[in-house]
Image (cartoon, rainbow, N blue to C red):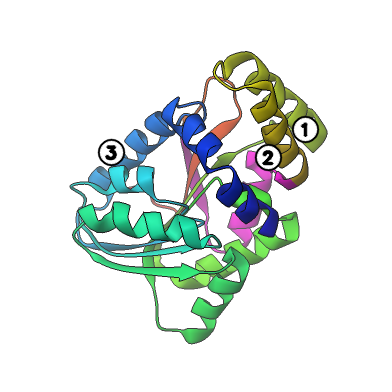
Amino acid sequence: MNADNQFFNEQWQLYQKVLNNNYMGHKEIYSILHDFLINHLQTPFSLLDLGCGDASFTTKSLFNTSISAYKGIDLSAAALEIAQRNLEAIPCKKTFIQDDISTAINQLVNQKDDKFDVVMTSFALHHLSLEEKESVISQISHLLESNGILIIVDVIRLAEEERENFIKRYLNHVRKDWYLISSQEYSMIENHISTCDFPETQNTLSEITRKHNFPKFECLYQDDFVTTQVLCFYKTGLSS
């Protein structure tokens, strides 16, 4: 996670360029999330946001929802400072923790003070190894209420697709379709993805979550390039 934190802090302008041009589909993703939160969580709910970044799009998805408490965790102090400003627009209790996901979530479980209705992680889980992903999902299960929901927004490999092939396919998409990215910026993105990204298949995530009390899931969104998905995992197996 240190490499990812360095990427965020040193390449802030590039990060904004990717978001502002919607190259990763944030507008569609967070519009769908907003509708989901409005329709499925009509009573006050608490949300834990793992790897929250600057929370700019999360803030948009929380407008006019019934959220009562938000807790954001990120390794980047710069990101959390901006997240606090962005989330001022949302009228709920807010807490921010600067730490890596694995350490922070272990501490929350050990403290036994918090339970959440929703745990969300957006474009963060794929930075962890398979073993770390399973450990985090196991801990999330302990932090969620009995009818809680885990939302994973992330890059997802095709079934039977190896990591190297996914990265090659994703970078080809970046090279062809991220029109305003310079060659220097592409090199930065290529280095980051090649060294920091370890996406899983949907089936792998489904197998892991079933082992940790999430008997049902659904895919709310998949991008046109079949690289990114929004997956909801239900502790009770109920989608409504």
Is residue 228 shown in magenta? no
Residue 201: mark: 2
Which label's residue is closer to the chain start, 2 or 3? Answer: 3
Which label's residue is closer to the chain start, 2 or 1? Answer: 1
- Residue 186 in the image: state x and y as whole percent: 67, 27
Which quarter of the image is occupied by the N terminus? bottom right
| Amino acid beneath label 3 | Asp
Q: Is residue 159 above or below residue 135?
A: above
Give the CA distance from mark 3 to mark 1.
Answer: 32 Å
Residue 229 is left or right of residue 183, and the answer is left
Give the CA distance from mark 2 to mark 1.
Answer: 8 Å
For the point 22% across and 46% down, the residue is 63
Residue 187 visible in the picture: yes
Residue 118 is left or right of residue 51, and the answer is left
The residue range painted magenta reads 196-220
Tag 3 secondary structure? helix
Q: Is the Cβ of the residue at disc 2 closer than 8 Å to that at disc 3?
A: no
The residue where tag 3 is placed is 35
